[in-house]
Amino acid sequence: MGKLSIFDQIKKEGGSIFTEFESKRILKQAGILVGETKLAKTSKEAVSLSQKMGFPVVLKIVSPDVVHKSDSGGVKLSINSAAEVKKAYDEILKKVRKQFPDAVVHGVSVQKMLQPATEVIVGTSKDPQFGPVIMFGLGGIFVELLKDISFRVIPVEQRDAQEMIQEIKGYPLLQGYRGKEPASIPALVEIILKISKLIEENPQIKELELNPILAYRNKAIAVDARIILE
Amino acid sequence: MEGEVSESERSALSLFFEPQSVAVVGSLREGYFGGYVVIKTLLNAGFEGRIYPVNPSYQEVLGLKAYPSIKEIPEKIDLVLIMINRRFVPNVLRECAGKGIKAVIVVADGFAERDEEGAKLQNEIVEIARKAGIRIIGPNTAGIVNSANGLTPDPYEPGYKKVKSGTVAICAQTGMINPQAFPYADLHYGVSKICDFGNKCDVDECDLLEYLENDPATKVITMYLESIRDGRRFLEISKRVAAQKPVLILKSGRTKEGAKVSASHTGALAVDDQIFNAACKQAGIIRLEKFRELFELPKIFSLQPLPKGNRLGMVTFTGGVGVLAIDEGAKYGLSVARLSPEITKKLNAIFPDLGKSVVDIGPPMAVNNYMTIYSEILKTVLEDGTIDCLFNVIWTSPFEDFVKEYVKFYKEMQGYDQKTIATWIYGPSIPLINALSSRMEDLGFPVFSDLEIAIKALGIAYQYSNRKKGEE
């Protein structure tokens, strides 16, 4: 029941859409590396958290009612000082409040801005005939515009995870293209297998998305995540 | 619990394919379609069980006593074929239930594939069958075949007596695979079982896969599907079966338009093609792209051993054919075999410059006694340990003598080597090409209709064998 309790607890607090903050707690418990995220309920808290983590930082709105955080002005990147944190905090709240006056706002998340790396996406959904399926792709335009993605039916085995990474057309980018550092394929395989297990053990999850995951040479870190329950 | 269910299903399907007695409910009027034809085709194929025609207007047909109804048949019946107006099907099914019959093929059409009334009738027969523990194939099916016991209850006149017996099982959601639609007597590889699912109201692809998994006569399974009834069950079963026997699937409805037409044609739910593709990869299913492949590609599994690796050897006419084959092979992970120094030397001794990756027998052809040189070359190439599979090109010549010579030579080649050989025959005469193709296949050397499909056959055989190796 240990694993279920976190779902029950969060469900009691809010609806069926988990915030980034809550989703990351679940993923961390499933053994997936996530970008360290702290919740700030005031701009003062945001400043002190940023100072503890070290600059640059990223601020993001934490609200179950705001799904597309960047589109609604709920994300600020590359923040380099306490003054900028305060300004960003106020701006985020102002913009979100204006667009979604009725939104429940938990606060703003503060996380350290990570070194750039190749961005990948892992997601899950439910197919009417095959049940839960898992998706893998490169981030950004590769998924949105080129639909360069691969699927497998959950549960997946090591071989399936390996194949679904190699299957996408953008695979050479992950192997290190034109001097870019290669991504750790074993780390990505591990994420796929852990997500498959998480979904298998928690059938109440309807959709899940780790977007983006930063794929480094020796590890892969999920910097944003979303979980939706049935 | 689950074990029990699948056990009873298995025995139900053996009633379909291995019945001791068959009742045929339908028109007994002489013609090209109907109960009369079913009985005639059963008799022609030498069906080993008892046959009971059922029709109240007849005393006798084709020398067999006819019965006015199912319940009047004095003996136990294993399998019933129903081919009457859809309105009367539920009643006949109730009679079957009363007699304790467990296997029924509903040939009759006009069910879910036609209109709302048909859909209602289909639900009704499913309900009757469930209550009585009857399994149904169909409705809207052209039926099944078991080549081993002469069970060819074909509702359409095929014009030939027997389906050639072999190891390929063919299943489809279409009547296009049935004996009246395909020249099974002329196929030179044989068929073990045929099943047209029709509307698939009960028995489906999973049931067939489970039955064929345990059918010793079947070595390879090829299927045409428009829909999947239960995705998760399909994945689980096909994965298990594909680990034992190659499973080849052609699935339609890849496009939105195709899926829409399929839904109206069989009353089935559309499948997301990307997800189906993923499931095939997970299960180790070989996915086909063309209708022709459904019948051609199983030959490589049925007649040839699996390749041990991906090294492709080639004996061709002209270098161009070799280059095309190399391009095609790369799609499936086949790589060009580098001949060993020893074999290269031997080949060069037969004819200058012959010892290359693409062994081009065009130039030495001009030399006297072509067949002697041809057989020497082929045997030498096959001796080479650096080759796992061979793309074999044969030129028939315009002369009949060549066919005889080739046949004589390939008779010698039976069991010569354990390498996988796919042959493509070309030449100036279609009758000679056809004649040699059939003789070659009778000898166990599959011949493919073009270069690309021959290479694909080797490619999928390599991929299947490679996956199997990974599982051991």
Image: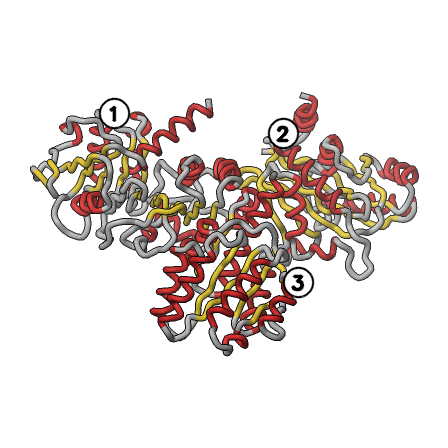
Quadrant in the rendering for residue B204? top left
Question: In terms of depth relative to the viewer, which is nearer, B202 or B39?
Answer: B39
- Determine whether the residue tagged by mark 1 lies in a helix, strand or loop: loop
Confirm whether residue B94 shows in the render: no
- Which of discs 1 and 2 lies nearer the camera? The answer is 1
Residue corresponding to mark 3: B342
Would you say B57 lies left or right of B458 here? left
Residue B99 at what x, y percent from top left?
Answer: 22, 25
Q: Are marks 2 and 3 on the same chain?
A: no
Question: In terms of depth relative to the viewer, which is nearer, B436 or A58?
Answer: B436
Kindly identify the residue that appears in the image at 31 percent across and 44 percent down: B147
- Which of discs 2 and 3 lies nearer the camera? The answer is 3
- How far is disc 3 from disc 1 in space, using C-alphas? 70 Å
Residue corresponding to mark 1: B100
* Count of numbered labels shown in the rendering: 3
Rendered position, A194 above or below A2: below
Confirm whether residue B330 shows in the render: yes
Label 2 Cα crowd, 10 Å radius (few <14 / some 14-19 / many 20+): few
- Determine whether the residue tagged by mark 3 lies in a helix, strand or loop: helix
Residue corresponding to mark 2: A201
Label 3 Cα crowd, 10 Å radius (few <14 / some 14-19 / many 20+): few
Q: Are marks 3 and 1 on the same chain?
A: yes
